[in-house]
Amino acid sequence: MPLSKASNLRRSAGEYKLERRRRAAADGLCRTCCAVHVPSGRSTCQKCSSDASARSARRRRASRTKCETERGVAALEDLGDSYSSDGDHRAAMNNYQRAFALTSEDGSAHMRLAFKVGREAVHRGVASSADDWFNIPLAATPPVPTTAVHVAQLHMQRIRALWASSRTSEVVALSERLLELAAAANNTQLVLSMQLSLATVLHLLSRHDEAERYLGAIDVRTLPQDHKIRCMYERVRGFVYATSGNAAMAFASLARALHHAEQDHDTYARVSVLITTAMCACSLGDIELAAELFLKALGIARDDNQVWNVAYIALEYARVLSRRGDWHMAHAYVNQAATLENPPPVVLEALAEIGIPIAIHCDDEHLLRRCANEAALTFAFRSGEPPRIGPVASSFARYFHKVGQPQRARSVLAKALESVTVADQHFDLPLAVVEFGETQSFARAREVLRARTLLPNAAVAVAHLHYFDALVFRRDGNVEGCLREAATAMTCFERLRWTSHEKAAARLCDPATSSPRVKTVDASSALAPFGLSERQRNVAELVIAGLSNSEVAERLSISTRTVESHMTAILRRAGLRSRYQLLEMLHR
């Protein structure tokens, strides 16, 4: 029907209705229903008047309910912000979720609160089921200016959630889809965020050429003056430089990333940058710097109540301590991290990767059982990240060999070796292959290690390569070659201050060397200045040994609440805030 004809019909209908009402009023009928006679002085009948009043009341109630809902959402969100700034992420998440449930009809507020729920979930380490909260289909969400920022924030939380649940390979498709949406909307900031996200994930997956392509598309001169974006860019660049062995450029970029994180007052980003810098320092040979940075990150995460991050950093610090030969302190930190309830997959992997060798070295069967959760092996392979697959597989190979399952050890090493092309950060896989793997895998394992030695600042890889060759010569029965390579490896590890590896190489040089012993700490002398009672001293010594509160209670035949009371008194007298600080005090 032509537009002019439709307009004429609508106008005719309106005129007819108006004429009908005039006639009804002239005949003394209700102007609304035009059927009921009304008394003089009234224009509508009782029923139509009641219906109109009911409609007005409903509109007022709806308006009032909407205002009350908006006020309730604002109050819950403000309360969540307050709890989050205080480090109480559980309470913050509860308030954000309640507000989130009230905003189903407000897309912008819904995405804003989904981002906040996801952020707190990541802080608490419960982001593996984050898809239940992030129920907004990104593909159907138009990246218009009013929602683009929230879409980007929500997407970044999804990426964090996927990473925390060891589903890193799934992030690529998600990022590419959002990058297309951002490009179609001509949203340059969102495009930049997605390019950085893809570069980060592809580097984690060891797809370096593709990652470089996305990084190369970014012109640093056009980067916005946004601390979050610049922090992310510098962190990715630092990681890339460290992977390629360029220590000076890596540390310079990571220092700038830390500066931007501090300027943005983002505690989580600050901790993440410190962890990345410490890992890069470790792979580039500066173990002292790595220890210092892990301790700093541990303090910040503890102050911000990042529970799962505290456990993860404690495990990474335990790895550094074990390399320095301080097995007692490493054992205590692993024991503390193992007490975390419902750890996310990334912590389970770290617990297996770092805890298994330490538990085996310290001959702690109980800790070994807690660390050797085979779900960690599944998570590592599911992630698709070679830097996670190699170390976790090598630790489980040691575990399987110890429990009398050599075939499983060989199988898991062969599967891991298919996924790893170069020793990015850790060098455990080649050594595990030569100790527990098949002979035909030696050449492939050596090539993985040799590829890293061809890069600059490869002192750690070179030391491991000599140690690898020494182990090969020992398996071949070539005593002279074994002694030569072991002596070179021992010298290299001595320069790096990797005391435990130095001693391992020394044992190859002199098999008669006494077996390694765990370094002990004189806890009684360290605790003497605080004037503890005998029972408090007993509790403190067991805690220092790495036992949890429930284990201490069982050992001393007292209640867990009594142990907690004693620990509060001990920390107060020592001027400390946590058992981690008690361990650090003894270590110093």
Image (cartoon, helix red, strand yellow):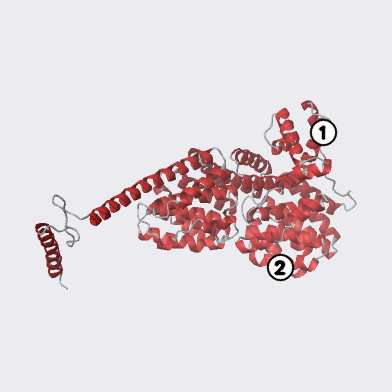
Q: Nearer the viewer, residue 474 or 355?
A: 355
Q: Are marks 1 and 2 in contact (CB under 8 Å)?
A: no
Q: Which mark is residue 467?
A: none
- Residue 95 locus on image (x, y percent): 51, 45
Q: Quadrant of the N terminus?
A: bottom left
Assign a secondary structure to mark 1. Answer: helix
Give the residue drawn at x 64%, y 44%: 310
Q: Is residue 126 left or right of residue 520?
A: left
Q: Give the mark nearer the N terminus: 1 vs 2.
A: 2
Q: Nearer the viewer, residue 157 or 534?
A: 534
* Disc 2 residue crowd, few under 14, some 14–19, many 20+, Cα 10 Å: some
Q: Which mark is residue 535?
A: 1
- Residue 411 locus on image (x, y percent): 73, 68
Q: How many marks?
A: 2
To which quarter of the image does residue 22 belong? bottom left
Query: On the image, numbered disc 2 is attached to which residue?
Result: 414
Amino acid type indicated by mark 2: Ala
Q: Quadrant of the C terminus?
A: top right
Q: Is residue 278 visible to us here?
A: no
To which quarter of the image does residue 569 belong? top right
Question: Taking 408 as reference, is 345 above or below it?
Answer: above
- Residue 440 locus on image (x, y percent): 75, 70
Give the residue drawn at x 46%, y 40%: 78
Q: Is residue 60 left or right of residue 23?
A: right
* Disc 1 residue crowd, few under 14, some 14–19, many 20+, Cα 10 Å: few
Nearer the camera: disc 1 or disc 2: 1
Q: Is residue 258 visible to us here?
A: yes
